[in-house]
Amino acid sequence: MNPNPSASQYLTYTEEVREALASNKPIVALETTIISHGMPYPQNIEMARTVERIIREQGAVPATIGILDGRIKIGLNEQELEAFANTPQVEKVSRRDFPYILSSGKIGATTVSATMIGAALAGIEVFATGGIGGVHREGETTMDISADLTELAQTNVAVVCAGAKSILDIGRTLEFLETHGVPVVGYKTDEFPSFYARESGYGVDFRLDEPAQVADVLRKKWELGLSGGAIIANPVPEESALQQHEIEKVIQQALSEAKEQNITGKKVTPFLLARIKELTEGRSLETNIALVYHNAKVAAQIAVALKA
Ligand code: PSU
Ligand code: MN
């Protein structure tokens, strides 16, 4: 189950997750960057607790993943969740940062890429998040391409998300995923969603309407030895969606401020998220939370179907 036995010495499981793994129960991985860098306190801790509850309600077990005290934590207790939610200087950890943060003993919130690594090491196949990173606008010159994409190219975890934010270049993000053989499944949608909005102007590779169909595609992909992840794109529920044209203006402003202030590297995405929240007077945060809850529910249903 564990693809890399030498890694198991660094993993620490909560009792609930250990028991779920031992009895082959469905498990859904969750990331900590969304808690530490994606949302303010206390909405972040409230969100973190609620997604776990939603997953349990669907008959699966949540495993929030993060790096703490030189350990890769697979599942967090209440006190650890609090630490990720309100410690001022939590590191943001992608594949690149993973070994250093583990070695340093620092507290590290895992992004989509690092959470996929932790999930795969623990043998967890399904992961729920908000949105994935991607090719940034002007990425063809800045080369700012999220490590989430190269992780999806190689690590066997299905990522349930509300698409990619239109702070990104969605067209180039999808091109990158195609090149690297990452299936982009539209869950009950023909259009790739753009996080805050249900539409993006881009299609998906194929549409599936049932968790069992998604599970079957994933099973076949991995049984064939076609390594890598998949994106299950699940649009934000209608009642919580923002309109593409209203969010576009805000995104333009946030992007130009990031440029003026010379924000680069891993600071870009948290900066943009926080500015968009301010500029929408908190509406983007409400949308963000609603879509995460929806993704958690669908991810749990897929995890259950994979064990059926
Ligand atoms: N999208 C969100 N909230 C987030 C992120 C993305 O709505 O918190 C985080 C995820 O952890 C994702 C990361 O993996 O941002 C991507 O960062 P970057 O663009 O620096 O690769
Ligand atoms: Mn980047």
Image (cartoon, helix red, strand yellow):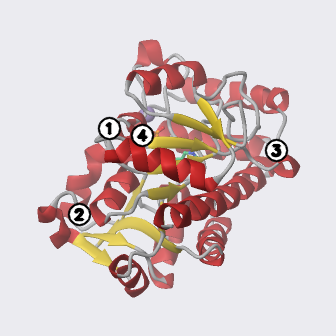
Q: Do the residues labelled 2 and 3 touch (CB within 8 Å)?
A: no
Mark 4 is on which residue type?
A: Asp
- Of residue 94 and residue 186, the one placed in the foreground of this image is 186
Residue that appears at 56% across and 58% down? 302
Mark 2 is on which residue type?
A: Asn
User: Farthest residue toward the top?
Assistant: 141
> Which residue is identified by label 4?
148
Distance of label 2 from label 4 (alpha carbons): 21 Å
Mark 1 is on which residue type?
A: Leu
Q: In which quarter of the image is the N terminus?
A: bottom left
- Give the quadrant of residue 257: top right
What secondary structure is found at the residue carrying circle 1?
loop
> Which residue is identified by label 3?
241
Mark 2 or 3: in front is 2
Asked if the beta carbon under badge 4 is closer than 8 A to the nearest atom of ligand 1, the reply is yes
Residue 113 appears in the rendering: yes
The tag on residue 2 is 2
Residue that appears at 65% across and 56% down? 292
